[in-house]
């Protein structure tokens, strides 16, 4: 069987971060984490979208990691590192544009008061709605 049409890509990730609203080990962690990740992902996609020239080789994602107290998640950028290494050799300007863009994204403060308040507000809405459903 011929598989030459399949392209194997070497995907890697770069960590962007989280807000810290959801704390590992707390009983409400999963609910808070889901809301936090959704708000942060929306914020990044709307304010720091992946440039068109890189959209085919990278995307934002929530990635889970192990910790002594349990699992936690961060927003990451999944990207094709083999392609990036090719650009480093063959198209250094594109390589530099990618890193300049990512450095801008990586430096975004995901712990601003505005983002934290938005996450808290959505969590309060969730708790209120859950309380009404259970009564």
Image (cartoon, grey):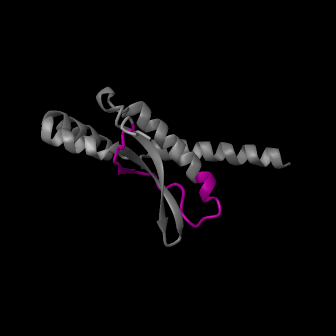
Seen in the picture, residue 3 relative to 63 is either above or below; the reply is: above
Which residue is nearer to you in this view: 30 or 51? 51
User: In the rendered structure, which segment of residues is drawn in magenta?
Assistant: 6-32
In magenta segment, residue 60: no
Residue 29 drawn above or below residue 101: below
Percent across and percent down for residue 55 are 36, 31
Q: Quadrant of the N terminus?
A: top left
In-front residue for pair 53/128: 53
Q: Position of residue 13 (x, y in %)?
A: 36, 50
Query: How many labels, in total?
Result: 0
Q: Position of residue 109 (x, y in %)?
A: 36, 46
- Is 28 positioned to the left or the right of 134 in the image? left
Instruction: Kindly give the residue lying farthest to the bottom in the view shown.
Output: 68
- In this rendering, would 101 be left or right of 74? left
Name the residue nearer the viewer: 24 or 126: 24
| Residue found farthest to the front | 1
- Please say whether residue 103 is visible from this viewpoint: no
Residue at the far top: name it. 52
User: At 29% from the left edge and 28% from the top edge, which residue is drawn?
Assistant: 53
Side of 113 where 82 appears, left or right: left
**Residue projecting furthest to the right:** 135
Q: Taking 22 as reference, is 83 left or right?
A: left
Location of residue 19 in the rendering, given as x and y in whole percent from the top left corner: 45, 52
User: Magenta segment: does it hold 17?
Assistant: yes
**Residue 82 visible:** yes
Residue at the (60%, 42%) spot, across then down: 122
Q: Residue at x 47, y 40 (%)?
A: 41
């Amino acid at each position: 069987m011929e598989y030459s049409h399949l392209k194997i890509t070497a995907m890697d990730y770069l960590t962007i971060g989280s807000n810290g609203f959801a704390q590992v080990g707390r009983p409400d962690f999963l609910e808070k984490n889901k809301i936090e990740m959704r708000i942060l992902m929306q914020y990044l996609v709307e304010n720091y979208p992946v440039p068109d020239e890189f959209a085919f080789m990278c995307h934002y994602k929530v990635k889970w990691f192990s910790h002594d107290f349990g699992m936690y998640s961060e927003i990451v950028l999944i990207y094709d590192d083999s392609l990036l290494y090719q650009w480093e050799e063959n198209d250094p300007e594109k390589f530099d544009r990618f890193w300049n863009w990512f450095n801008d994204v990586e430096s975004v403060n995901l712990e601003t008061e505005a983002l934290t308040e938005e996450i808290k507000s959505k969590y309060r809405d969730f708790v209120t709605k859950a309380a009404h459903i259970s009564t």
